[in-house]
Image (cartoon, rainbow, N blue to C red):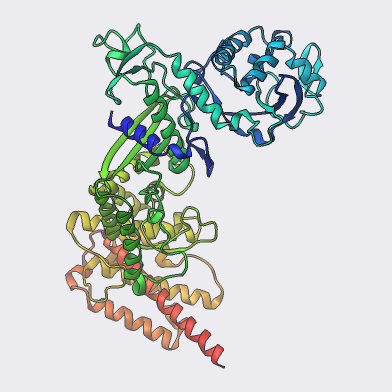
């Protein structure tokens, strides 16, 4: 039960923001839910109709609810207490709509609340008005409704403004008062929230032992749904089956298996809804949240570079500034240690819905803040690489940054960047990577192999930038793999002294690609180079494929001519001189290290090209 205790504590520590919307997320008061609203009906304090106005954009509002109405379903569902659908509010609804309407249920609940607290002017006004049974007639007079063939259709004031069926829209009440300082909107009245909670708790008398509070309290039996909007009917806790296999002979009643009070269940579920909306990683029917019990933010393990902005201001090169960027990120992560007490716990929870009615917790972990930050730092140190793609949230063109890719981007590269790849497969990969990040486990070998095979198939990529994304992310995975399994550390800058066979073959391929690309640019031709097209074959048969590529670049060296051709020929000779002859002629397949050498050599060419461009620009300014 540690997860529900953590959520309960989170709610208690954030009481100051209850009912206040922040960036589209609301921490709800207990015994309240959010609902769409379509029509605002204005009353005066005497319960007399004043006006009705359609709500723009179907605004979400906070409404009081009961245990039954919060999970209502079916044709005879329980009513809410104040703001609800017209079928519950109109006494004569059966004349124009379905046979069943919940008017009696609504009036019974609202009346009980009104008589418990008769001094509340808003509850009194709504109760007195609805009791008259004139709602539909008043809406017809206000041109919200028209009668067509005995049924209700939208009138001139609502047609085109309210997008739902006339039988299925929500009404919210506002009670206008002479006191201009008083909140007249029932869905915004914080005092009204508290009064409903006080009343509803007074109606709960049957008690049991609550395992979270550690004392006897009124127990919840129908726990909330609508926790995550992609699976609105799914619940985490339920026990509605007393005749089949739910208890499997171990318990007589559900309360013997667990005990949660109304208060704990409501607060924990509301905190969970708030966290998912505020900071959850939400894709399909899976959501992942990472939080501490206070309202302070944490670095997100599922975001590129953990969501920390340490590279936005400048375009960077791997050789010159990798250490600077790593230092910046370490400083930013270290700042989180200072914000929290040493014993602060970080909670990570992954939830997934596999059926319409069940939302399962597939992963839950509690980690001390110091350990959490240390593991993020370790993931960064062992996976950081020069990335070339647009991070999430950066709406401008493809970018460059030194850092770690998000688990979702890694999953995309491993299983293909096209949209036809099964989303479920990607989500399972994200779960595996989350464990690697927060628990410090080894990166899955099969994932690295998949990404490598996808990346070396260069012609399969539709455009340059999708290939650049795949290449840079795969290099991150390979760097991580070598650290995890062989404790070998690779730097992002080109290592001119490294003489391992695979690294050198990668450098050779990068030089060959650069030579042909240079020559093609001179003639204005755009196509894949021979090095690109033969990359997959090169990875499995490097010696024989290199002989083909080496012969093909001779004409391109002639096109380049001059010092450019001479410098590239010299570089090829330098790389060849680092080979062990037996390694060079061996035909065994290349490992992932080949891509590291290939990428580093390309980055070295890019950095030198930028330096030359900067020098030319400076010379022009001086002239």
**Residue occupying the point 25% across, 65% down:** 490
From this view, report whether residue 337 is shown above or below residue 73: below
- The percent coordinates of residue 23 (x first, y second) are 53, 44
Q: Residue at x 53, y 84 (%)?
A: 617
Q: Is residue 247 above or below residue 237?
A: above
Image quadrant assignment for residue 498:
bottom left
Q: Looking at the image, which residue is at 81% across and 12% down? A: 149
- Residue 168 is situated, as x and y percent measured from the top left of the image, at 65, 20
Q: Nearer the viewer, residue 567 or 280?
A: 280
Q: Camera-side residue: 384 or 202?
A: 202
Q: Nearer the viewer, residue 8 or 429?
A: 8
Q: Position of residue 306 (x, y in %)?
A: 38, 53
Q: Nearer the viewer, residue 4 or 424?
A: 4
Q: Give the number of callouts.
A: 0
When asked about the image quadrant of residue 601, the answer is: bottom left
The quarter in which the N terminus is drawn is top left
Q: Is residue 547 visible?
A: no
Residue 48 horizontal side relative to residue 223, left or right: right
Say if residue 594 shows up in the picture.
Answer: yes
Residue at the bottom extreme of this rendering: 623
Left or right: residue 461 compared with residue 548 = right
- Where residue 398 appears, as percent x and y from the top left, is 50, 61
State whether residue 318 is above or below residue 355.
below
Q: Is residue 480 above or below residue 577?
A: above
Name the quadrant of the C terminus: bottom right
């Amino acid at each position: 039960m540690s997860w529900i205790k953590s959520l309960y504590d989170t709610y208690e520590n954030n009481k100051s923001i209850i009912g206040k919307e922040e960036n589209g997320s609301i921490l709800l008061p207990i015994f309240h839910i959010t609902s769409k609203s379509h029509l605002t009906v204005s009353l005066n304090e005497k319960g007399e109709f004043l006006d009705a106005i359609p709500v723009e954009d179907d605004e979400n509002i906070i409404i009081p609810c009961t245990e039954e109405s919060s999970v209502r379903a079916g044709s005879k569902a329980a009513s809410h207490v104040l703001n609800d659908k017209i079928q519950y509010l109109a006494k004569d609804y059966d004349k124009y709509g379905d046979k069943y309407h919940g008017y009696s249920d609504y009036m019974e609940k609202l009346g009980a609340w009104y008589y418990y607290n008769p001094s509340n002017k808003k509850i009194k006004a709504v109760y007195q008005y609805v009791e008259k049974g004139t709602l539909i007639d008043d809406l017809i007079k206000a041109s919200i409704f028209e009668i067509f063939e005995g049924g209700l259709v939208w009138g001139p004031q609502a047609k085109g403004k309210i997008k739902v069926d006339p039988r299925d829209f929500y009404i919210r009440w506002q009670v206008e008062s002479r006191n201009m300082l008083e909140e007249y909107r029932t869905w915004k009245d914080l005092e009204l929230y508290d009064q409903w909670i006080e009343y509803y708790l007074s109606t709960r008398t049957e008690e049991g032992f609550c395992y979270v509070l550690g004392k006897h309290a009124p127990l919840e039996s129908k726990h909330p749904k609508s926790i995550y909007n992609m699976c609105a009917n799914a619940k985490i806790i339920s026990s509605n089956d007393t005749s089949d296999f739910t208890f499997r002979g171990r318990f007589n009643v559900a309360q013997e298996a667990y005990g949660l009070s109304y208060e704990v269940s409501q607060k924990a579920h509301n905190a969970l809804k708030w966290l998912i909306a505020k900071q959850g990683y939400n894709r399909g029917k899976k959501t992942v949240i990472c939080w501490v019990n206070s309202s302070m933010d944490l670095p997100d393990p599922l975001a590129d570079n953990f969501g920390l902005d340490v590279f936005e201001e400048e375009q960077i090169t791997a050789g010159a500034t990798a250490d600077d960027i790593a230092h910046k990120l370490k400083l930013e992560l270290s700042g989180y240690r200072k914000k929290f007490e040493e014993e602060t716990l970080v909670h990570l929870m992954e939830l997934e819905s596999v059926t319409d009615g069940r939302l399962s917790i597939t992963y839950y972990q509690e980690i001390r803040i110091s350990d959490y930050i240390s593991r993020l730092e370790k993931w960064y140190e062992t996976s950081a690489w020069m990335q070339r793609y647009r991070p999430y949230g950066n709406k401008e063109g493809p970018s460059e940054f030194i850092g770690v890719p998000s688990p979702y981007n890694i999953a995309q590269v491993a299983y293909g960047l096209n949209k036809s790849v099964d989303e479920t497969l990607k989500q399972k990969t994200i779960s595996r990577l989350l464990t690697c990040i927060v628990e410090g486990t080894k990166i899955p070998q099969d994932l690295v192999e998949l990404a490598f095979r996808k990346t070396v198939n260069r012609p399969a990529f539709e455009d340059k930038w999708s290939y650049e994304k795949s290449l840079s992310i795969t290099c991150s995975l390979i760097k991580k793999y070598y650290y995890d399994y062989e404790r070998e550390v690779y730097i992002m800058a080109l290592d001119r002294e490294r003489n391992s066979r695979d690294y050198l073959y990668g450098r050779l391929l990068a030089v060959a690609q650069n030579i042909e690309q240079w020559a093609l640019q001179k003639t204005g031709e755009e196509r894949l180079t021979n090095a690109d097209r033969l990359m997959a074959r090169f990875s499995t048969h490097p010696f024989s494929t290199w002989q083909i590529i080496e012969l093909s670049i001779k004409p391109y060296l002639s096109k380049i001519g001059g010092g450019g051709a001479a410098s590239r020929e010299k570089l090829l000779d330098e790389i060849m001189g680092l080979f062990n002859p037996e390694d060079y002629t061996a035909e065994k397949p290349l490992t992932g290290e080949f891509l590291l050498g290939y990428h580093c050599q390309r980055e070295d060419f890019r950095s030198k090209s930028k330096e030359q461009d900067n020098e030319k620009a400076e010379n022009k300014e001086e002239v």
